[in-house]
Image (tube, rainbow, N blue to C red):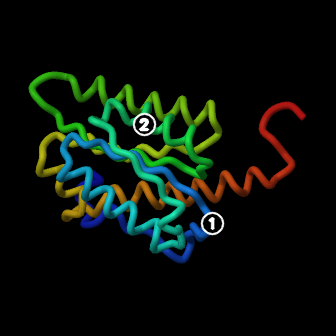
Amino acid sequence: MASALKNLSQYDESTMPSAEGMRFGIVVAEWNAHITHALYEGCYETLLKHGALEANIHTVQVPGSFELPTGAKLIASRHSLDAVICLGCVIEGETRHNEYINNAVALGLTNLGIVSGIPFIFGLLTPNNEEQALDRAGGKHGNKGVEAAVTAIRMGALKQEMSNSKSKIGYS
């Protein structure tokens, strides 16, 4: 079980591509702000740590996690980006609202990525309770914002690599 690991956000820094020259969008849900802002801090600091410039990181806030795909589309339409990171937290409650929101966000971001060719990174926490969320927003299990930034850098590097390549997927 993944939660048995001490820190899920550990990664091999020696294999990380540089984020120098890359441009990122970050979309942060305001709902559960004490959690999502901790995710944002981990994400932002990781991008800077790997060479991204502050001027190349564009951030917007949206009311809740359900609005992440729309916010992601809007920020990608406004800036030329290598990846868009979406950060939110939907805590399971007494109803199944979390299932609907989580699935809608996942599907929305997947569709945006496929249609646009821009990586849209799923940084949505889907915990059973607030304690689990805090454990994954800088607590004992690391910070999923860090993981989302690492994924964005790696996917941004892949996007750049594939953009410079002559071969394409599909018919020649």
Q: Position of residue 100 (x, y in %)?
A: 29, 23
Would residue 31 appear left or right of 53 to someone viewing this image? left
Is 1 in front, or is 73?
A: 73
Identity, as a three-letter code, of the amino acid under mark 2: Gly
- Numbered circle sitting on residue 119: none
Q: Quadrant of residue 145?
A: bottom left
Q: Position of residue 131 (x, y in %)?
A: 11, 51
Query: Is residue 135 depicted above or below 54 in this figure?
Result: above
Circle 1: is it few (<14), some (14-19), or many (20+) Cα within 10 Å?
few
Query: Is residue 124 depicted above or below 154 in this figure?
Result: above
Circle 2: is it few (<14), some (14-19), or many (20+) Cα within 10 Å?
many
Disc tally is 2
Identity, as a three-letter code, of the amino acid under mark 1: Gly
Query: Is residue 112 depicted above or below 132 in this figure?
Result: above
Query: Pointers 1 and 2 in contact (CB under 8 A)?
Result: no
Q: Which residue is mark 2?
A: 71
Q: Secondary structure at mark 2?
A: helix
Q: Quadrant of residue 6?
A: bottom left
Would residue 148 appear left or right of 79 to someone viewing this image? left
- Residue beneath the point at 60% across and 52% down: 82
Q: Quadrant of residue 95?
A: top left
Q: Position of residue 42 (x, y in %)?
A: 33, 63
Q: Secondary structure at mark 1?
A: loop
- Residue beneath the point at 73% across and 57% down: 161
Q: Position of residue 59 (x, y in %)?
A: 41, 51
Q: Residue furthest bottom?
A: 14
Would residue 57 appear left or right of 125 to someone viewing this image? right
Q: Which residue is mark 1?
A: 21
Would residue 60 appear left or right of 1 to someone viewing this image? right
- Is the C terminus in the top left, top right, bottom left or bottom right quadrant? top right
Q: CA distance from mark 1 to mark 2?
A: 23 Å
Is 126 in front, or is 41?
A: 41
